[in-house]
Amino acid sequence: MPTRKQFVYTFQGQCMALVLAALHEMSGINTKQQTIAYIEKKGWFDLQPEDLESYPTHKYEAKWHTMIAFGRQWCADAGLVTPHQERDKWEISAFGAERLAGVREKFKTGVYDVKCGYLWSPVFKKWLCPDYEPSARDLKRPPNLSNEYEFA
């Protein structure tokens, strides 16, 4: 019987982890652009050339920016970010901080394997798990990743 893939290893889970980690580190209320800039400055997203292209439905935005925006929406749907009446207000909720801490603990103790995060850079993997060292066991990004989700 096949084992179920842990949610944090999915495309959706990895995007959500990046958003929650950035909001946790920045603290307070931030915008989409501030969050993306923080992730980029830290080098947390394992950017590939195709990530800099745009989706046909988001012509003025790099694909990875759209992925981060959807990560935030998925976090909102799960109650991991604080709802705000105004648009473009991103803030980790107490529940989101608790879940992020729990996921980090599972990486640190070896319950989860950070090497399964194919969207995450080695820098972010090290943030999740301080004992992480890059190796040939790190999963590579699957081909045609941009086809995994339709961002319409």
Image (tube, rainbow, N blue to C red):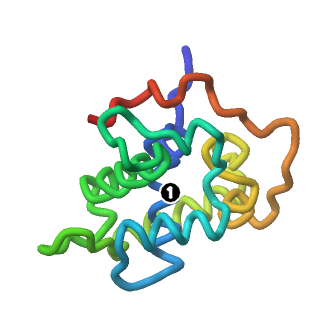
| Rendered position, 149 above or below 130 | above
Q: Which residue is mark 1?
A: 17
> Label 1 neighbourhood size at 10 Å, few (<14), some (14-19), many (20+)?
many
Residue 33, position as x, y percentages in the image: 41, 68
Work out which residue is located at the far bottom of the displayed protein and give it: 28
- Drawn side of residue 89 relative to residue 46, left or right: left
Residue 89 at x, y percent in the picture: 27, 74
Quarter of the image for residue 105 reads bottom right
| Quarter that holds the N terminus | top right
Q: Is residue 74 left or right of residue 14?
A: left
Query: Of all residues shown, which one is farthest toward the front?
Result: 60
Q: Position of residue 45 (x, y in %)?
A: 61, 54
On screen, residue 41 versus residue 80, left or right, reads: right
Given residues 37 and 128, the one toward you in this image is: 37
Q: Residue at x 34, y 30 (%)?
A: 150
Point 34% across, 75% down: residue: 91
Q: Could you tell me which residue is drawn at 68 percent across and 67 percent down?
A: 127
State the residue lying farthest toward the top: 1
Secondary-structure class at tag 1: helix
Residue 144 position within the rendered picture, expressed as x and y whole percent measured from the top left: 55, 23
- Residue at the outermost left position: 85
Quarter of the image for the C terminus: give it. top left
Q: Amino acid at mark 1?
A: Ala
What residue do we see at 65% from left, 41% from top? 48
Q: How many marks?
A: 1
